[in-house]
Image (spheres, rainbow, N blue to C red):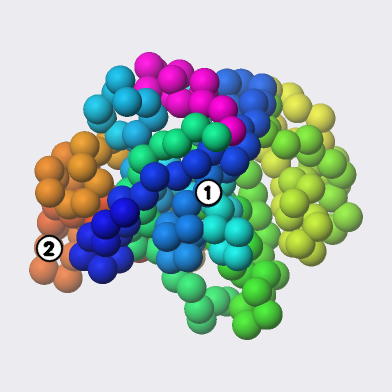
């Protein structure tokens, strides 16, 4: 285990548990103490799915258990790498680099933050929600989640009424309910209690917003520049690396 730049760690992580859900979705829990100790909402890991696959895969961190030294990731099978990853069982060891990236804003929240995530964009919202339930945060976010496949949890009717949301849109994520946070689910698959439509944030409302971007990447430490995206800066447009300049950016800066 070697420290890199004092913040990134190359770590052999043991598989603690591996759950399979509908829609080729999986929740992987890893024993990775160095990453768990330092991870912040919005960070991700770069994981070797299998020794036969040299190219690593970036995975958002969904939850952290710092005392146990464990992290959770949610992923969907999409290609050979994740197919091999899905075959890993408790006791297997996976090499990873983490935690990587610029996190979300971690203080100075407005009283009612709005967290929006769809599909594999859900994990960062769960991690950020968990941070917001800490005693010092003093906020109560509204979490909106969308998916085109069944959710990797069993939705249940929300105990919280949310003004402006139709009464029949009542499906919620149980974990958020347990934390005392209202949530709502959306899908185009006519799932019971879900909003029939997409989860989007429209620019016309001029809301202060941060976004987490996703890009394919080779190294994830800023060396290859394979994950460059165009970002508006005070000095004009510039190419920024999603891995180390992001993945979290100010939404106003993203064209």
Residue nearer the viewer, 169 or 133: 133
Which residue is nearer to you in this view: 245 or 115?
Answer: 245
Task: Tell me if mark 1 has few (under 14), some (14-19) or many (20+) residues whose alpha carbon lies within 10 angstroms of its own.
Answer: many
Taking the spot 21% from the left edge, 65% from the top edge, the residue there is 5
Q: Is residue 82 magenta?
A: yes
- The answer to whether residue 22 is left or right of residue 174 is left
**In which quarter of the view is residue 119 placed?**
top right
Q: Quadrant of residue 250?
A: bottom left
Residue 190 placed where, x, y %?
73, 24
Q: Report x, y in % for residue 110.
A: 57, 76
Magenta span includes 209: no
Q: Which mark is residue 236?
A: 2
Q: Residue at x 12, y 43 (%)?
A: 224
Query: From which residue to which does the magenta span run?
Result: 78-90
Residue 127 visible to an observer of this rendering:
no
The residue at which mark 1 appears reads as: 31
As measured in the structure, the alpha-carbon distance from the residue carrying label 2 to the one carrying label 1 is 43 Å
């Amino acid at each position: 285990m070697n420290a890199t730049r004092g913040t990134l760690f190359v770590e052999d992580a043991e598989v603690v548990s591996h759950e399979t859900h509908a829609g080729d979705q999986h929740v992987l829990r890893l024993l990775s103490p160095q990453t768990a100790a330092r991870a912040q909402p919005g960070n991700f890991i770069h994981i070797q799915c299998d020794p036969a696959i040299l190219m690593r895969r970036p995975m958002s961190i969904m939850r952290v258990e710092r005392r146990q030294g464990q992290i959770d990731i949610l992923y969907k099978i999409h290609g050979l790498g994740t197919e091999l990853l899905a075959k890993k069982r408790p006791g297997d060891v996976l090499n990873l680099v983490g935690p990587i990236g610029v996190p979300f804003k971690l203080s100075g929240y407005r009283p009612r933050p709005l967290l929006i995530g769809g599909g594999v964009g859900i994990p960062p919202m769960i991690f950020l929600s968990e941070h917001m339930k800490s005693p010092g945060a003093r906020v109560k976010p509204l979490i909106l989640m969308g998916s085109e496949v069944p959710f990797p949890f069993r939705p249940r009717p929300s105990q919280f009424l949310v003004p402006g949301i139709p009464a029949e849109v009542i499906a919620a994520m149980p974990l958020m309910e347990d934390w005392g946070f209202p949530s709502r689910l959306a899908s185009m698959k006519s799932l019971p209690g879900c909003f029939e439509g997409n989860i989007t944030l429209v620019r016309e409302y001029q809301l202060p917003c941060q976004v987490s971007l996703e890009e394919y990447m080779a190294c994830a430490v800023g060396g290859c520049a394979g994950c460059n995206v165009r970002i508006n800066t005070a000095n004009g447009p510039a190419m920024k690396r999603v891995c180390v300049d992001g993945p979290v950016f100010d939404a106003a800066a993203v064209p």
